[in-house]
Image (tube, rainbow, N blue to C red):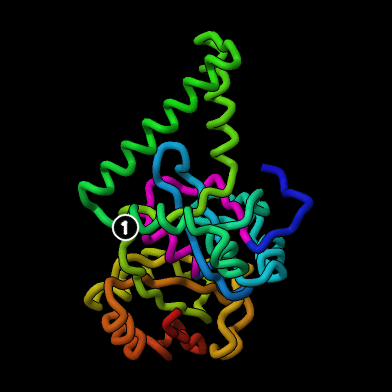
């Protein structure tokens, strides 16, 4: 999707790898974008209409612009990142600017968090209301079946690119991430996985793009150094691994720095 001329604190990321679990994808996107400014929300879509898409919401528009310029075209999970400004303001941005502006959306969010019969009834009523409105619109315009189908496809195509920030039903607890910097270029996912697999709770290790800048608390890395994220099941497990590997010599003169994101 082409970069829009109107800047926004929310970035639309498309063309993402679709086999990665949603929580892992959100964690890695957060770690990837957070060096450019405070990230207040990351929404990854996994349903059929939004597979391979995500929205990254920054507190400041300047930070979003910096991330867009630095990360567009970078490799992420073996795919080239496609990033543009979102067409509409995110739910997180709207509620920060005017908490009363999205009361209806907030009610929908709260309903989706309750897995109950009330939720099922609410969604069924919403579906019936939308179906009824669509039927009345079709009668009013005198649309035939073929016209209605083409109209639905156009609406779906627009919705796929529109900003639809919402809380998903299956949100899990955020997984803690270790940011590991000053690693020699020879390091890869297999080597890092072998290193961290000895620690309880380790999930995965992912190389960060070459444009990634380690946190200011990290010492200046060696020329040509790369960075990795290591994801764990719990913060305690990640902290224990950090204490063990921080300062670990991957090669002579290459002391790794590890901190919790």
The count of marks equals 1
Coordinates of residue 21 in the picture (x, y in percent): 35, 54
Coordinates of residue 147 in the picture (x, y in percent): 57, 13
Indicate left or right for 216 with 172 as reference. right
In the image, residue 57 above or below residue 12: below
Coordinates of residue 114 in the picture (x, y in percent): 27, 56
Nearer to me, 61 or 247: 61
Where's the N terminus, which quadrant? top right
Task: Give the image quarter of residue 245.
Answer: bottom left
Indicate left or right for 90 with 249 as reference. right
In the image, residue 254 above or below residue 190: below
Q: Residue at x 50, y 85 (%)?
A: 254
Residue placed under numbered mark 1 in the picture: 113
Where's the C terminus, which quadrant? bottom left
Residue 11 belongs to the span the image colors magenta: yes
Q: Residue at x 27, y 41 (%)?
A: 121
Indicate left or right for 65 with 243 as reference. right
* Magenta-drawn segment: 10-30
Nearer to me, 90 or 198: 90
Residue 13 belongs to the span the image colors magenta: yes
Q: Residue at x 27, y 81 (%)?
A: 237
Q: Residue at x 57, y 55 (%)?
A: 75
In the image, residue 70 above or below residue 168: below
Coordinates of residue 244 in the picture (x, y in percent): 32, 89
- Label 1: how many Cα within 10 Å (few below 14, some 14–19, many 20+): some
Nearer to me, 181 or 116: 116
């Amino acid at each position: 999707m082409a970069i829009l001329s109107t800047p926004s604190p929310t970035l639309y990321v498309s063309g993402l790898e679709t086999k990665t679990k949603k929580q892992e994808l959100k964690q890695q996107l957060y770690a990837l974008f957070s060096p450019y400014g405070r990230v207040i929300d990351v929404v990854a879509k996994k349903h059929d209409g939004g597979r391979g898409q995500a929205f990254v919401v920054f507190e400041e528009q300047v930070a979003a612009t910096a991330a867009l310029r630095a990360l567009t075209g970078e490799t992420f999970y073996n795919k080239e990142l496609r990033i543009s400004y979102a067409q509409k303001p995110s739910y997180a941005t709207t509620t920060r600017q005017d908490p009363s502006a999205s009361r209806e959306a907030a009610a929908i969010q709260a309903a989706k968090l309750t897995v109950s019969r009330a939720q099922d009834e609410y969604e069924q009523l919403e579906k019936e209301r939308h179906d009824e409105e669509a039927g009345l619109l079709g009668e009013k315009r005198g649309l035939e079946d073929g016209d209605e189908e083409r109209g639905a496809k156009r609406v779906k195509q627009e919705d796929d690119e529109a900003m639809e920030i919402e809380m998903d039903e299956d949100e899990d607890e955020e997984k803690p991430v270790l940011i590991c910097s000053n690693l020699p270029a020879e390091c890869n996912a297999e080597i890092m996985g072998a290193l961290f697999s000895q620690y309880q709770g380790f999930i995965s290790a992912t190389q960060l793009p070459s444009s990634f800048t380690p946190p200011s608390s990290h010492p200046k890395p060696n020329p040509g150094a790369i960075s990795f994220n290591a994801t764990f099941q719990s913060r305690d497990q990640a902290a224990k691994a950090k204490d063990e590997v921080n300062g670990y010599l991957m090669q002579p003169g290459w002391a790794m720095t590890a901190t919790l994101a």
